[in-house]
Amino acid sequence: MNKKAILLLGMLAVSAIQVPDAFSKERAPSISIQADDLNENDLVEHRHYTNRSGKAVHSPAHSKTGAIPGGASAQCRDGSYSFSQHRRGTCSHHGGVSQWLH
């Protein structure tokens, strides 16, 4: 199985997870991001994931120039920028949130 097929299967598995009602009552506020602001050419990494709302979101990535990329919602402690649309779990595999940008 190639890497794309494995990634797709992983994304499908994650998107199929149901959150119990007990947890959904205390959701963190959503972050509004304009996907049109994101320019892939400004980023080093080019991965995506499906968030809990079922939307494709760019995974945390480093900026080629060091400037804050359009559409970024937070900077992670490892220096990458997150494009998360929900606060919960943002930068969870990147050392946590260093600073919120919105």
Image (cartoon, rainbow, N blue to C red):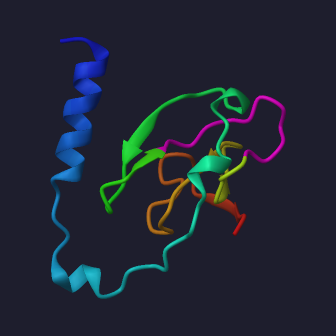
Identify the image quadrant of the N terminus. Answer: top left
Q: Closest to the observer: 35 or 24?
A: 35
- Residue that appears at 65% across and 53% down: 71
Bounds of the magenta segment: 58-69
On the image, the x and y values in percent for residue 23 come to 25, 80
- Residue that appears at 60% across and 57% down: 34
Left or right: 11 with respect to 93?
left
On the image, the x and y values in percent for residue 62 come to 68, 35
Identify the image quadrant of the C terminus. Answer: bottom right
Q: Is residue 60 magenta?
A: yes
Q: Is residue 15 above or below residue 32?
A: above
User: On the image, which quarter does residue 28 sit in?
Assistant: bottom left
On the image, the x and y values in percent for residue 5 come to 23, 21
Q: Is residue 27 above or below residue 101?
A: below
- Residue that appears at 67% across and 31% down: 43
Q: Main secondary structure of the magenta part?
A: loop
- Residue that appears at 64% across and 44% down: 38
Q: How many marks?
A: 0
Left or right: 87 with respect to 55?
right
